[in-house]
Image: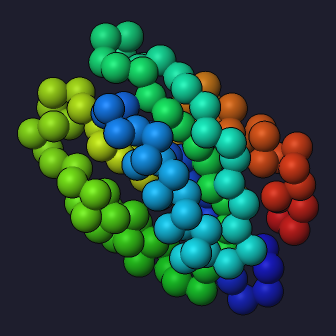
Amino acid sequence: MIENLNSCTVGLGSNTADRSCQIGQAIEHLLGYLENASASSVYESEAFNGKDEPYFNAVVHGYTSHDRETIVKYLKEWEAECGRTMEDTLKGMIKIDLDLVIWNEHILRPKDFERHYFNCGYRELLAKGAYETL
C-alpha cells in the first residue's frame, strides 16, 4: 500500500452494443479518479451464464484516500449515470458493471477473482508490475 492510501482493484464489464465505448469511458474515468492507476487491455469474454451477449472486460488497479464504502458508492453511482438499470440487468443487458474485487490486499469478491473475466486482466496488471508496491 502506498503510504496513507488504500489499494483497490476494480473489475469492469459491459455486454451491450456500445460496450467498447462504455468500457473505454469507465477506464478513463477510473484512471482520473484513482491515484497511480493502471488499466489492463480490454478483452472479450463469454457471459458466465452461457446465454447473454459476450462481454468486454478490463481491470483497473489504483490507490485512493477514500474508504471502501465511498469507493463502492462511487462505482454504483457511475453505473447509474451510464444508464444501468435493474430492468436491463434482469434481461441480461449490462451497460456497465464496476465491482470492487480487491481492497487493501483482501479479496472481497472471491467468485469474481477466480473467474476468467477478471483474472485475465488481473494477471496482465501483475505482469506489468502494477502491484509492486503491495
- Between 11 and 58, the one nearer to me in the picture: 58
50 sits to left or right of 8: left
Q: Residue at x 60, y 86 (%)?
A: 65
Furthest toward the top, the residue is: 50
- Residue 41 lies, in percent from the top left, at 68, 42
For residue 64, above or below residue 39: below
Q: Residue at x 53, y 47 (%)?
A: 11
Can residue 27 be seen in this snapshot? Answer: yes
- Residue 121 lies, in percent from the top left, at 68, 39
Q: Residue at x 23, y 27 (%)?
A: 92
92 sits to left or right of 59: left
Quarter containing the C terminus: bottom right
For residue 102, above or below residue 52: below
Q: Looking at the image, what colour scheme do you see? A: rainbow
Residue 43 in which image quadrant: top right
- Residue 86 lies, in percent from the top left, at 14, 44
- Between 112 and 120, the one nearer to me in the picture: 120
Q: Residue at x 52, y 83 (%)?
A: 66
For residue 29, above or below residue 50: below
